[in-house]
């Protein structure tokens, strides 16, 4: 679609039970001048046929098929085939409100921003809202401030979706192929390239928390990628923005706690615990004093440091109370 203003890139892999809701929500947007790029990443279910069906009856839908290479590879492939200068991502098991694209575009136009950022609603499959990560203010921030807010997980989420990007930055900084938690490795680099980032207070993206998703899949050593990504952020910040080094360690603490949760029932739990404690060594005092690290994460990490067994019991108890 040569005259498209925005390209919506949707990586697709074995999610046939969610795909139609996702694509229908995109086709129901309040803005019209956009294209939808469905990237079938070697699915072995009904997804390839569903993608082709949408492309056959919608002039603004493009169905692409490729050998399986993972989420990052599919995103990069979609960006490379996008005809618009601006990109928006949607994951194929999620869905969006009708205002999703238009609200991001309006934010971009209002501030002349290289990247526009809005909120994400995390919800269960039954529709129950778990939390709403969105800006508490609307405005323009520079690269350093955007990276700082992303590290804290406040106002700016680390996720690739719920953002509008200038295509040129995504081409310059593609997502790392073969990595889990690819956005931890990439989002801060994209912010660093930009002169300004617009933050909005709306949230029109619905992230589905489901058992089969990457974030909720059975633990494997590949999940350790999140720690490596957070450590890369620390080294980058030390060199480029030393004033916000404490924020980078908050990001490491957040990723560490999430990793511990995933590893709890695995045989690698004690190895992961030792790796986490080693990474946070020497930073405990500053993290405990930090007003930006949520109290519940502070408590869990302290308990983990004191006793591996107690941490397991605390997590099990907290899960039962939900």
Image (cartoon, grey):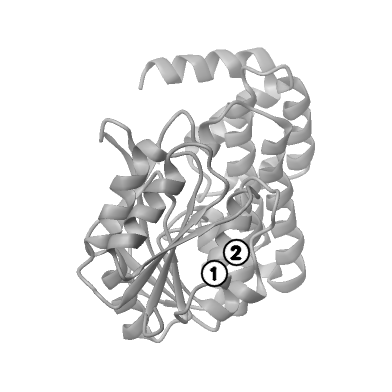
| Secondary structure of the residue carrying numbered label 1 | helix
Q: In 3D space, how far apart are the residues under numbered discs 1 and 2 (Cα atoms)?
A: 5 Å
Residue hosting label 2: 76
Can residue 40 be seen in the rendering of this structure? yes
Up the image or down, 8 lies above or below 288; here it is below
Relative horizontal placement of residue 112, taking residue 82 as reference (left or right): left
Picture quadrant where residue 46 is located: top left
Residue 30 lies in what quarter of the image?
bottom left
In the rendered image, residue 151, in percent from the top left (x then y), is placed at 57, 56
Quadrant into which the N terminus falls: bottom left
- Residue 17 position, x and y percent, is 36, 36
Labelled pair 1, 2 in contact (Cβ < 8 Å)? yes
Which of these two is toward me, 198 or 144? 198
Q: In the rendered image, which quarter is residue 136 located in?
A: bottom left
Q: Is residue 179 left or right of residue 146?
A: right
Q: Nearer the viewer, residue 319 or 175?
A: 175
**Crowding at mark 2 (Cα within 10 Å: few <14, some 14-19, many 20+):** many
* x and y, in percent, of residue 236 in the image: 74, 65
């Amino acid at each position: 679609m040569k005259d498209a203003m925005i390209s919506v890139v949707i990586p697709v892999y074995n999610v046939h039970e969610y795909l139609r809701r996702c694509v229908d929500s995109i086709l129901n947007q309040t803005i019209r001048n956009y294209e939808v790029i469905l990237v079938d990443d070697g699915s072995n279910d009904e997804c390839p046929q569903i993608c082709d069906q949408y492309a056959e009856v919608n002039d603004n839908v493009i169905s692409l098929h490729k050998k399986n290479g993972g989420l990052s590879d599919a995103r990069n492939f979609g960006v490379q085939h996008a005809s618009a200068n601006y990109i928006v991502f949607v994951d194929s098991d999620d869905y969006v409100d009708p205002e999703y694209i238009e609200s991001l575009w309006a934010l971009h136009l209002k501030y002349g921003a290289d990247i526009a950022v809005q909120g994400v609603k995390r919800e269960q499959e039954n529709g129950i809202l778990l939390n709403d990560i969105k800006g508490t203010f609307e405005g323009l921030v520079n690269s350093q401030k955007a990276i700082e807010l992303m590290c804290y997980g406040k106002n700016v989420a680390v996720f690739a979706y719920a953002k509008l990007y200038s295509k040129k930055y995504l081409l310059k900084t593609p997502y790392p192929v073969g990595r889990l938690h690819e956005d931890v490795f990439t989002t801060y680099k994209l912010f660093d390239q930009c002169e300004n980032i617009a933050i909005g207070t709306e949230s029109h993206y619905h992230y589905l928390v489901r058992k089969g998703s990457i974030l909720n899949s059975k633990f494997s050593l590949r999940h350790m990628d999140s720690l490596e990504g957070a450590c890369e952020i620390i080294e980058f910040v030390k060199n480029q923005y030393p004033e916000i080094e404490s924020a980078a360690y908050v990001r490491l603490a957040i990723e560490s706690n999430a990793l511990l949760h995933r590893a709890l029932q695995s045989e690698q739990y004690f190895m992961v615990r030792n790796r986490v404690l080693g990474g946070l060594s020497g930073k405990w005092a500053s993290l405990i004093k930090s007003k930006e690290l949520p109290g519940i994460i502070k408590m869990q990490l302290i308990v983990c440091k004191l006793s591996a067994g107690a941490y397991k019991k605390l997590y099990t108890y907290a899960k039962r109370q939900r």
